[in-house]
Amino acid sequence: MNQYTASSNEELSPQVLLKQDTPSVATELAFDEIAQLAAQICQAPVAMINLVCDDQLKLKASHGITPQDVPADHSLCDFVRSDGGHELVLPDVSVDEHFRNLPCVTGEFGLRFYAGAPLLAPDGIVLGTICVLDRKPHEPRPELITALRTLSRQAVAQLELRHAIQLRQKETEQLRLMGLALNASSDGIVITDARLPDNPLIMANPAFERITGYSVEESIGHNCRFLQKNDHDQPALLTVRSALRKKQSCRVVLRNYRKDGRPFWNELHIAPVRDAKGETTHYIGIQSDITARKEADDALRQRDAILEGVNLAAETLLNEPNLAASLPAVLEQIGEATGSDHVCLWYELSTPDQASRLVPAKLWSNPNLPPENQTRLRTMTWDTACGWPKPVQLRQGRVLQKGSVDCNVEEQHLLQSLDIHTLLLLPVFTNEGHFWGSLSLGSAQRTTAWGFVEIETLRSAARVLGSVIHDRETSAALRISEERFRSVVTSLNEVVFQTNVDGLWTFLNPAWQEITGYSIEESVGKLHLSYVHPDDRERNNQLLQPLIERKKEYCRHEVRYITKLGGFRWVEIFARLVFDANNQITGTAGTLNDITVRKQADEALQKQRIAIEAAIDGVALLDDSGRYTYLNQTHVEMFGYSHPDELIGRDWQPLYSDSELARFTNEAHAELAKTGKWRGTVTATRRNGSTFAEEVSLTQIEGGGLVCVCRDITDRIEAEQFVLNALKEKEVMLKEIHHRVKNNMQIVSSLLNLQLDHLQDETARTMFIESQNRIASMALVHEKLYQSNDLSRIDFTDYLSDLTENLASILGAHTRNISFVLKSADVHLGIDTAIPCGLIINELVSNAYKHGFPKGGPGQVTLSLEALADGHLQLEVADNGRGIPPDLDLRKTKSLGMQLVHTLVQQLRGTLEVKRENGTRFIIRLQEYIRKEQHRP
């Protein structure tokens, strides 16, 4: 430590003289006596002593003249001051060519004699002057200068003495204040004498006594190591010993002991004191009791350890979608961070037959915890009968601490049986403030109560745990991957921005790049207006102007922002001004919300609205109470109104009669409740009371309400009735045609029969009979159509039955002992397929009777018809007769019947297959023939 000497640092100077305090009476009297002595020695009536002040001479002492009479002109004394320290003697100033015109000479004072000498400090600085004056001339005397020099030195000596006295007074005051500060210091301050053996204490302030408990009398003469007792192995002591050995300063933290034996942490600062020769004579030690700070630091480290464990546990909870899988690791992290022997999570279980209770959900325990205690904690119920405290306070959100000695008897027994010395219970609430359960931490080693910081840190863990439990139990949608969870929690869809007063971006969040494609790095520092679509910039400035002029607290408007790919996005801007402490605008802050999809939806909705308004159908929306909320113009005009406002807000029921309302109740309401849709035809009432046929389609809207689409079908019903009437007339006419065709064919058959009576040639007769059979098969089709309710199709199975029975009769099947078997599915065919099929069957069955059994039976002819899965028909005609000769090619035969069969099969786009085993079997696969409609011009 440096020694301070005031006299060595402050020299006598005009500046020091100016700072001096008010001089004493004795000092001023000494200057007056010197002035009087100067007047006597120099035989002059007036003597003065002047000192330099603010670069000017001011009167210090005088003799023979009052201060009011002193001449204002100091030119002669100024000359002495500035003449390099030389004396000036003027026997008669009035004759001196340099000074005779001075005001003090020519004026009222009438100065004639002047003798002056400078007051010189030891370093040669002029402090002032001493002079004698007279209004009459004097004879020059050599001893005059010697006398003035002597008197000048005496005046300077007085100034030095005065300065020394003032310095001593200042040092005395400083020492007094330092003593007061030493005694008032909260730090212990001691001084040791390095010159004495073992460097003993020679001074200690009251704070040392207060910190250590040792009185000053007990401490003086001893080395400070007595504060260490037997704790001499501290690493910091090596630093102290090294500093003392090297006679250097040091700062360490030691574990010392008070007089009563209690330890405390001592922050010690040692500094050496050296004399003028640089030798170390003393040491100053400053001791600070930092026990509270050290304990706080330890508590903070413990808090940080707990906080790290809690954060790790929270991260585990948040990142693991499976709560049950993450809980063991979470409880272990909390347990290891807090040094607990067990951490248990309890949840409230409510059953219909008993009150709610707490049961263990998951337990973590230190491996050193006895297995029987682990088992008890996993299986026991939170029951006050077991010694657990009532959970009422936990439900109120309070934290409970229980020790093995500061609780009731039941609780003591429980804790002792579980080897728990301290127990901490924290409530667990869900996000909605619902009490979910409790988190308990037990320790067998901890002897101190849980601190506030530790409890608050663990409460935060319980809050996170409750929040995660709530999320996991109530929302399966939140069980997602880590990336998505963090994206949802930490990211915003809206751009958050800040600009400075010049409109340059100063902050943008990641949503900016997602919306515009521009990175944050390339955008910050750029003008925000440069990203607004050029066509919207002027409007954007106009909308922002009221905000900038402070006419509005915020602004909200929609503009287009350009994207990096060259397109644009519609953005809703919300902005506020940002002010500094002086209420000056520093910029703006707000959000940019991408509303492109909404804009597109609005445009699409507008297009749909236009389309709905232009629709030929009436469209209306009704709310839950059956009142119209929207109608298009078609719907309005359909009911005889001119504008939607005439029906908006009104009930729909007055537009229908009571009978139609009953139909809605019986039919529509039930179907809407079942399927959400209903469609039907009703009679509606116009504004003027007239009615019209209305086709109505009702669709239930999710969330409530109905969509009604209706159409006036009066013209359509009239047209349909006209068509039905015309159709009935055509059906009658068509039946009559079929009846007449059948009759005409029977006439032709009868004519052929008459002709047979005149034919003698057997071949010709056979040809006529075959023609009759063919005509009969075709006539039978028209007969069936005439009898059918469906004029376009006939029951082909019924047709086959009649056809084969007729053929069997004509061909004498029964007399020739030939049986007939019919196997047919329920098939209906149109006339364009039925007639060719009938002719084919007529030919094949006739051939089977004639050629398969030329000499008669016994024998059998089988006819089968079935509809295949691929939509084709399969027709089979088989007999067990003698069969077709192998060398006979049916495609090249000249038989009219077989030629007819091939032609008809081809017409029906079918295939013909002949099998010759055990008789003959014809297999025909064909499609029903559909006539192409003839389009009318």
Image: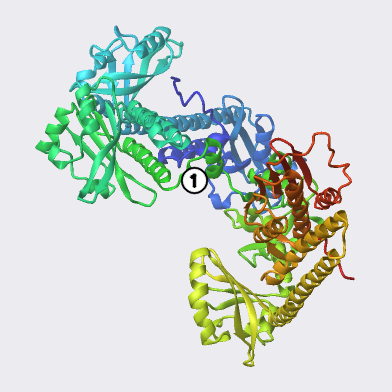
Q: In front here: 387 or 32?
A: 387
User: Dividing the picture into quarters, in which one does residue 390 lie?
Assistant: top left
Q: Residue at x 42, y 16 (%)?
A: 250
Report the quarter where the N terminus lies: top left
Residue 221 visible in the displayed image:
no
Name the residue carrying label 1.
477
Q: Is residue 266 above or below residue 128?
A: above
Q: In front here: 903 or 320?
A: 903
Measured from the top left, where is residue 916 in percent x and y?
74, 37
Q: Residue at x 86, y 51 (%)?
A: 896
- Residue 162 is left or right of residue 589, and the answer is left
Q: Is residue 57 above or below residue 281?
A: below
Measured from the top left, where is residue 439 in percent x and y?
29, 38
| SS assignment at label 1 | helix
Report the quarter where the C terminus lies: bottom right
- Residue 720 is left or right of residue 242, and the answer is right
Q: In front here: 844 or 663?
A: 844
Q: Is residue 675 above or below residue 253?
A: below
